[in-house]
Amino acid sequence: MKQPTQISWDQSMIEKYNYSGPRYTSYPTALEFDDSFTEDQLLTSIKNSKSDKLSLYIHIPFCAKLCYYCGCNKVITRHQHKADQYIEYLAAEIVKRAPLFKDYLVTQIHWGGGTPTFLTPEQILTLSALVKANFNVAEVGEYSIEVDPREIELSMLDTLKEAGFNRISIGVQDFNKKVQIAVNREQDEQFIFDLMARAKELGFVSTNIDLIYGLPHQTPETFAETMQRVLDLDPDRLSVFNYAHLPSRFAAQRKIKDEDLASPQQKLDMLHQTIETLTGAGYQYIGMDHFAKPDDELSILQNEGRLHRNFQGYTTQEECDLLGLGVSSISQIGDCYAQNQKDVRPYFESIDANGHALWKGCGLNRDDEIRRVVIKQLICHFDLDMAQIEEKLNINFEEYFVEDLKLLQTFIDDKLVDITDRKITISPTGRLLIRNICICFDVYYREKARQQQFSRVI
């Protein structure tokens, strides 16, 4: 078993390489998806897939209030009947898709959004029952849902437990009231503590807290206070995201004033102290924005070299297909990616017309599949054994990646990457820049090099 991931902060290296880059929840990334991708291509990929395990992602787009920082695909409404209509269309999509996966065992389900807990308890139980009636859902699996602590009763957790969820992810973002007001996300701190306590009482096996650094009025000092309150919450996992201020792309962000935002140096200071605080408190740095307790499955599997990554981020599930259901959701099946219609109205219209909501996607060629394996290995484990890759993919590593290894040389020169005995090892400093290192193996990125189509890596 490997030693847990170690991190070392080097300000000069972080400043040198802090440019835009993909998050690599897929390779090729979603920028390569095309609307010429067809339903027949998807069906062929399902037929030819070698997997018999399935992960389900269900997108619930509704939110009662607009958070000004948010770049997610959402619908702001307080009209509950809109969710009734949406569930009817989700049901139609489920009934259409599920028979294609009759030989699969579902071992992972995640409801994201938007705000899945926008749904009433009755709607949640109805949708959950629908999923279980149409798919072969394993008794033991990872069943998670995102929770907004502002708009629910404590009893919602009892409903989620009844629906079969065993993991929750709570969107906190920041405990500072001034920050909350500036992003239109005021919440009751005590209720969040009550929510965590109730989740543990009910036997939820994992709790995750989401935080964002770089929001208006945040300073390293105020964010340090938030981190201390989070440690009091004692979550199993944390996701600490960098706020990407892109008001030209996300209209809600125009309500955030540039002059209220932290400076680039302050953002780096927040990240630095967050890493030091969490690792000092015993959390393992999983990669990029994610931390987990050492006895959490994410940490255990990373140390065993068996961690995976897909559109849901780092995942404990073994190599399995992912089926996305609902508006804008993305599937990863066999040798293809497929995305549903991005907006609710076209999603409804597509299901009415076709029985499915496919919008665009891409089929992977042999080169894509090879590079996907390499990038996933590096981003999950920070090392790579060329001989193992050669055996798995039937290639000569140095010959196949001759151009890529040249691009890697700058990271080697800066002691961020080491290649010894045909093993690539990312240094403790390089691990914070893993997205940049993976770019060396991304042929599509070379064509878009340095264009502002991605968020900054830090």
Image (cartoon, helix red, strand yellow):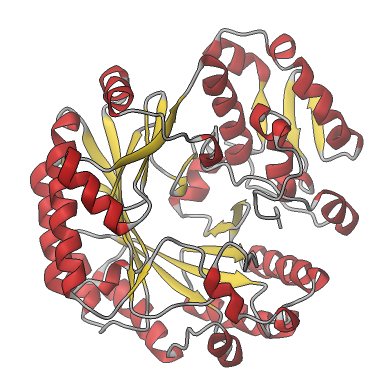
The residue lying at 22 percent from left, 78 percent from top is 79
Rendered view: 313 above or below 115: above
Rendered view: 116 above or below 327: below
| Furthest residue toward left | 133
Q: Is residue 162 visible?
A: no
Picture coordinates of residue 114 (x, y %)?
A: 37, 66
Please count the marks in the image. 0
Picture coordinates of residue 437 (x, y %)?
A: 73, 38
Res 15 quadrant in image? bottom right
The residue lying at 90 percent from left, 40 percent from top is 414
Picture coordinates of residue 228 (x, y %)?
A: 61, 81
Which residue is at the front of the view, 125 or 326?
326
Taking 389 as reference, is 201 left or right? Answer: left
The residue lying at 50 percent from left, 68 percent from top is 210
Rendered view: 107 above or below 178: above
Q: Is residue 45 visible?
A: yes
The residue lying at 66 percent from left, 55 percent from top is 455
Taking 351 as reference, is 289 left or right? Answer: right
Picture coordinates of residue 343 (x, y %)?
A: 35, 56
Q: Quadrant of the C terminus?
A: bottom right
Which residue is at the front of the view, 173 or 448?
448
Q: Quadrant of the N terminus?
A: top right
Which residue is at the front of the view, 323 or 228?
323
Taking 53 as reference, is 175 left or right? Answer: right
Taking 72 as reference, is 422 left or right? Answer: right
Res 69 quadrant in image? bottom right
